[in-house]
């Protein structure tokens, strides 16, 4: 009986030890798994902390950029506040100058018309002439300015000859080489326009 009881006790103790070893193995596996999980958590925490630091730096840069943009916007608003009245003033000046140029153009056209109207050409009939005939008017005008007499053609011939250095001895006799009605453009006798400029 005792032996039998001892055998039973031995079997019972072996089973108990086997169960304990099994539980111990399970505990070690659980501890290893738990340690692995904790290590992964620590790695994740470290990574997140690094990312948080990076994000904080980026946020700081963004805030700095935002501040610069706000300053630039303020400067732009100040510039616009100053520029808008200047642009308005310039537009008013341009409008005024345009009106002045238009007025001056009208005055210039009027002055040019008056100049053409009042300029007394030596060749051709003026637009409007009151008083004596054209021939007498020219004779009087030439006599007043050059103190010579004779027909207008003779006087002009004398003037042309004098300008060319070949003044005839008698102003009343035209030079045979120029200043006839068909030869006013020969050397020594300027064209009507040129003679006008010299005389006037």
Image (tube, helix red, strand yellow):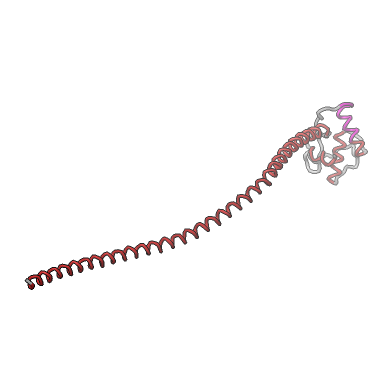
Figure quadrant of the N terminus: bottom left
- Magenta stretch bounds: 130-141
* Residue sitting at x 87%, y 40%: 158
Locate residue 95 relative to residue 55 in the image: left or right: right
* Residue sitting at x 49%, y 59%: 56
Q: Quadrant of residue 95?
A: top right
Q: Is residue 135 found inside the magenta-colored segment of the image? A: yes
Pinpoint residue 11: horizontal percent, then vertical percent: 12, 69
- The correct choice, above or below, for 35 with respect to 155 in the image is below
Figure quadrant of the C terminus: top right
* In the foreground, 88 or 167: 88
Q: Quadrant of residue 174?
A: top right
Pinpoint residue 64: horizontal percent, then vertical percent: 56, 57
* Residue sitting at x 15%, y 67%: 15
Q: Quadrant of residue 135?
A: top right
Q: Is residue 180 found inside the magenta-colored segment of the image? A: no
* In the foreground, 24 or 129: 24
- The correct choice, above or below, for 22 with respect to 173 in the image is below
Pinpoint residue 118: horizontal percent, then vertical percent: 83, 32
Pinpoint residue 163: horizontal percent, then vertical percent: 85, 44
- The correct choice, above or below, for 166 with respect to 112 in the image is below
Locate residue 152 relative to residue 52 in the image: left or right: right
Locate residue 11 relative to residue 101 in the image: left or right: left
Tell me which secondary structure the magenta stretch mostly adopts.
Answer: helix
């Amino acid at each position: 009986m005792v032996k039998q009881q001892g055998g039973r006790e031995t079997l019972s103790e072996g089973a108990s030890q086997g169960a304990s070893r099994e539980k111990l193995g399970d505990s070690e596996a659980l501890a290893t798994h738990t340690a692995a999980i904790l290590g992964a958590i620590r790695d994740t925490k470290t990574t997140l902390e690094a990312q948080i630091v990076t994000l904080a730096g980026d946020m700081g840069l963004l805030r700095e950029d935002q501040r610069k943009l706000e300053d630039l916007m303020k400067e732009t608003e100040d510039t616009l506040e100053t520029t808008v009245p200047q642009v308005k003033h310039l537009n008013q000046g341009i409008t005024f100058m345009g009106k002045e140029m238009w007025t001056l153009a009208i005055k210039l056209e009027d002055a040019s018309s008056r100049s053409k109207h009042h300029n007394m050409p030596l060749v051709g009939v003026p637009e409007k002439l009151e008083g004596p005939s054209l021939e007498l008017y020219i004779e009087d005008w030439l006599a007043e300015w050059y103190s010579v007499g004779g027909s207008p053609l003779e006087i002009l011939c004398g003037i042309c000859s004098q300008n060319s250095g070949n003044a005839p001895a008698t102003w009343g006799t035209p030079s045979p080489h120029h200043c006839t009605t068909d030869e006013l453009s020969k050397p020594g006798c300027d064209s009507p326009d040129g003679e006008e400029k010299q005389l006037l």
